[in-house]
Image: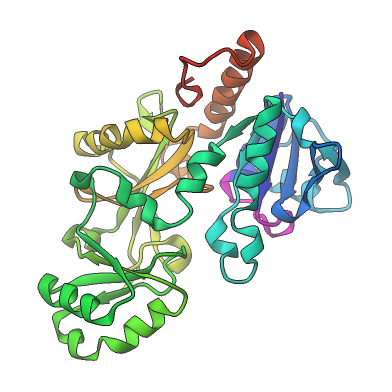
Amino acid sequence: MKIGFVVNDVMTEEAGYTTTRLGCEAVNQGHEVAVMGVGDLAYDPDEFIRARARSVPQKKYGSHESYLKDLLGPKAVKKRITVDELDVLMLRNVPSDDYLKRPWAATIAAEFGRVAMRHGVIVVNDPNGLAKASSKMYFQLFPEEVRPRTLITRDRDEIKAFAKEEGRCVLKPLQGSGGASVFMVEQSDIPNLNQMIDAVSRDGFVICQEYLPAAADGDMRLFVMNGRPLQVKGKYAAFRRLRSGGDMRSNIHAGGKLAAAEVSEKDLKIAEIVRPKLVQDGMFLVGLDIVGDKLMEINVFSPGGLGSAQKFTKINFTKFVIAALERKMNYMKFYGRNFDNVDMCTL
């Protein structure tokens, strides 16, 4: 299988990233792997998508650290490839990371991926689905029963009224990630809310969300693949993120700590409720961030943490992700493009 990974910038990849783990696993399974940044893509006059890509020189790696060292170092194989000749193109860039400094890069991977699909390349997650998910507004399209009560606006008075009614709420930007510009508003903060609103609304709309008391215990990320919770040998690809000190954010790079997760029937019910839309939108691999009996976020752009799940379960889930991509490729090659009644997300 020829598989390409699109990331924000190849040179900023790290050994612990899920994309690195997936690339290393694919190489170890004997597949051809090419990694490219969004800025490396090109649409040529012959109407083919090409890219300046990097590959590794070895066919086997003992660790993802050594794999990444070769990918980024002088031993890397650097050449311009024809993306349309790949079997699978996995979009693993995070648009929100480019939203401010490189706005041109935010949507370009999905746009190029959509063109590559014309030539039979399997692109995951589906670029058309990702286009719908370009901001956190996408989250509001899922069933109400799994979402916190939410207001999205730029109007100060509306924000203050919501905060007063809730008594305790969370403010965060509609665009953005990683816990940046996220505030918890207490009743005592309402008279001085303007400063928080200024910080969050600086770059766009503000999400005002009901505070979930269960958030004090952190959240759980549960991976869903092909519309179903990713489970191997009775263990789910999941982990918990706990808050550190008084910081309300549980994001790992915002100071959160990792812990093992126990996936309950409640969590599986949430996954089942959102499954139809995930499948409909072609979301092959996503991360559900669950707090109590609600979803806080559905991560469809480069969901990370398979290594964290492996840490607590001792299961190399990347092996099974690559195997699922192989099945899609084999189905495509056997049936061609005559699969109108089959959803590629569920294969």
Residue 101 sits in quarter: bottom right
Whether residue 68 is visible, yes or no, is: yes
Q: Is residue 29 depicted above or below 330 in this figure?
A: below
Q: Nearer the viewer, residue 160 or 245?
A: 160
Task: Identify which residue is drawn at 44% across, 28% down.
Answer: 226
Place of residue 131 in the rendered image (x, y in percent of width and height, measured from the top left): 51, 47
Q: Nearer the viewer, residue 337 or 274?
A: 337
Q: Which residues are magenta?
A: 8-18
Place of residue 201 in the rendered image (x, y in percent of width and height, measured from the top left): 39, 77
Place of residue 153 in the rendered image (x, y in percent of width and height, measured from the top left): 31, 70
Q: Nearer the viewer, residue 59 or 2?
A: 2
Task: Identify which residue is drawn at 41% across, 75% down.
Answer: 181
Whether residue 304 is visible, yes or no, is: no
Q: Is residue 215 left or right of residue 8?
A: left
Residue 278 sits in quarter: top left
Task: Identify which residue is drawn at 36% across, 72% down.
Answer: 182
